Amino acid sequence: MTITSNYDGKCKKCDKEWKVGQQIYWQKEPKCICIDSQCFESQKSGASSTTNANQTNFDPNQAKVTRTTQQREADLGAFIATAANASVKLTGADIAQVWCRQ
Ligand SMILES: [Zn+2]
């Protein structure tokens, strides 16, 4: 959005200055401010690309092999229940094997 500046300012990124009463581009979260629309847009995309980077780096295939703690606990719980039904004595190694299984 654009706002009317109520103070003299200067862009931290491109060093362009603005005066009181000038229309400037402004965004609250993440904070982006500049009198230059292109600089403002690049600030916005720069700010959001930091957030998106994590999402872009998120690899669903990786997520499949790296199980969450909840999944491990669920697996381990099922394993222990099965072993208990079969009256199998579990060792720490058995449990570790299930817990660490990818
Ligand atoms: Zn700027």
Image (spheres, helix red, strand yellow):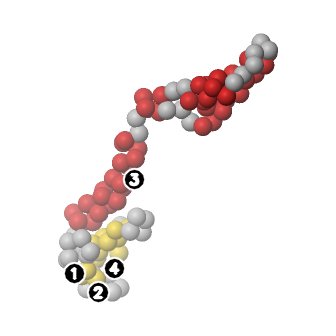
Q: Is residue 82 left or right of residue 11?
A: right
Mark 4 or mark 1, which is nearer the start of the sequence? 4
Question: Callout 1: few (<14), some (14-19), or many (20+) C-alpha neighbours within 10 Å?
Answer: few
Q: Give me the residue at 51% from left, 27% from top.
A: 102
Residue receiving disc 1: 17
For the residues labelled 2 and 3, say whether their Cβ atoms are less than 8 Å apart: no
For the residues labelled 1 and 3, say whether their Cβ atoms are less than 8 Å apart: no
Residue receiving disc 4: 4
Question: Callout 3: few (<14), some (14-19), or many (20+) C-alpha neighbours within 10 Å?
Answer: few
Foreground tag (2 vs 3): 3
Disc 3 residue type (three-letter)? Thr
Mark 3 or mark 2, which is nearer the start of the sequence? 2
Q: Is residue 55 left or right of residue 68?
A: left
Mark 4 or mark 3, which is nearer the start of the sequence? 4
Foreground tag (2 vs 4): 2
Residue receiving disc 3: 51
**CA–CA distance in space, label 2 to label 3:** 30 Å
Disc 2 residue type (three-letter)? Asp
Q: Secondary structure at mark 3?
A: helix
The answer to whether residue 76 shows anywhere in this view is: no
The answer to whether residue 48 shows anywhere in this view is: yes
Image location (x, y in percent) of residue 19: 25, 85
Residue receiving disc 2: 8
Image location (x, y in percent) of residue 92: 67, 28
The quadrant holding residue 28 is bottom left
